[in-house]
Image (tube, helix red, strand yellow):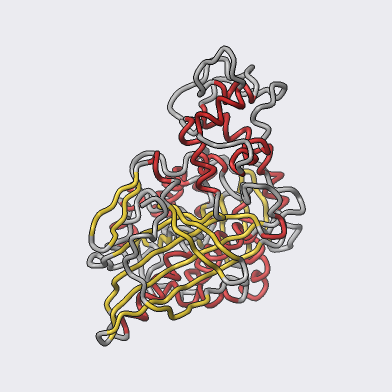
Amino acid sequence: MRNILIIGAGRSASSLIKYLLNKSQEENLQITIADLSLELAQKKTNNHPNAKAIALDINNIEQRQTEVQKADIVISMLPAHMHIEVAKDCVIFKKNMVTASYISDAMQSLDAEVKANGLIFMNEIGLDPGVDHMSAMKVIDEIRAKGGKMLLFESFCGGLVAPESDTNLWNYKFTWAPRNVVLAGQGGAAKFIQEGKYKYIPYQKLFRRTEFLHVEGYGRFEGYANRDSLKYRTVYGLDDVLTLYRGTIRRVGFSKAWNMFVQLGMTDDTYIIDDSEHISYRDFINLFLPYSPTDSVEIKTRLALGIEQDDIMWDKLLELDLFNPNKIVGLKDATPAQILEHILNASWTLQPEDKDMIVMYHKFGYELNGKQEQIDSKMVCIGDDQTYTAMAKTVGLPVAIAALQILNGKIKTPGVQLPITKEVYEPILKELETFGVIFNETKMPYIGYNPDRLIGN
């Protein structure tokens, strides 16, 4: 039997493991699921005869290398910074490797060795990055094949709560990595190109510069700019494109409400709050408000944010129980961002019966035969439950399909790479459709530059 080693059995691995186990009989596969927690690894095997769970400490070099040696291909679902040691083992023992993470400088530095050994290290093959690369390059390549010239590329993606589970005023719940949500947009200005001009949005204005999006059957959404929209300009072959913008999708109104936290300073992760362990939620928000011998914390908050008592923004704050003097933070040496994440988790954690939703939206503007045209490509995926979530499906399934394609010799080009070639994206996108990950492409009138496109621009 052919052995696939999966390192990391967390949430993102659920659909990945299920897919490979379902294929194990016909594809003659033995799936080894390795995790620091043996209990978690065993749970993911689902007692399947072709699955084996092992406890693996990634820092145990001897054990790690022993398991890599046994494998025909290695899938690393570890946190991004942990991939590199596994990758080095794969070079030593000449094993192909798949990850869903961004290609780090350390990973890229292995490219020459990987190619010299005829190996394939497929990275960025999850959702975002991953499905976004593949679905974008499919359309871009089709446009170019017809002789079209790209003028505009906009791409948006968001992990959201499904409509039937949307039960709070924020129209949002954490479906993945709460810390990433709290820290979104920090570390520099968002950068993109609009009509050939570089544009920058500083963090303090990021959530007031949004774009409306409409998805048939699901209503209106908004998108705010990612930190660096230009990262893939050369990779996608879009060096001459006039407009290039990548963003994150939320329901309309979320960004304006989130901006309240930004303006107050509650998303800051650069310093520790004194005595954070013992302060109440009410104490926490009061830390960022001016002193007043007469005004209540509620009044000071409304004055600081410029909102009235009948404003929906105020209702959103109340819903989080932010002004409760009896709820204690309970986090020692915590930053404002960590405390905010803790408070939000109490309200935004998915309940057992909740389902999540992934929305992806691409816009392609191009010139063909002297005429300007546009294609909008939209995908919505709803999770099955709290194990096989939309996020787990859209992250894990592309990883699993790619691993099997490599194992079966259908993906052949060696090197440290991301999934932007037809050899890779065509079969994977086709198979993803059988799991409900379907992009609907529609020809639209070319919009191009619209000065009112960004709210607040």
Q: Position of residue 326 (x, y in %)?
A: 72, 22
Foreground pick, 417 / 181: 181
In this rendering, would 301 be left or right of 80? right
Q: Quadrant of residue 123?
A: bottom left
Q: Nearer the viewer, residue 232 or 343?
A: 343
Q: Which image quadrant for residue 139?
A: bottom left
Q: Nearer the viewer, residue 186 or 311?
A: 311
Compared to residue 381, the image places residue 206 above or below, namely: above
Q: Position of residue 408 (x, y in %)?
A: 50, 74
Residue 178 in percent (x, y) is at: 57, 42
User: At 26% from the left edge and 66% from the top edge, which residue is drawn?
Assistant: 242
Residue 10 makes an appearance in the image: no
Q: Can residue 417 be seen at all in this image of the molecule?
A: yes
x and y percent of residue 198 in the render?
A: 25, 54
Q: Residue at x 52, y 15 (%)?
A: 291
Q: Quadrant of residue 93?
A: bottom left
Residue beneath the point at 37% across and 48% down: 227
Say if 431 sits above or below 116 in the image.
below
Q: Residue at x 41, y 69 (%)?
A: 363
When the figure is inspected, residue 330 is found, relative to residue 145, above or below; the finding is above
Task: Specify the quadrant that holds the N terminus.
Answer: bottom right
264 or 440: which is nearer to us?
Answer: 264
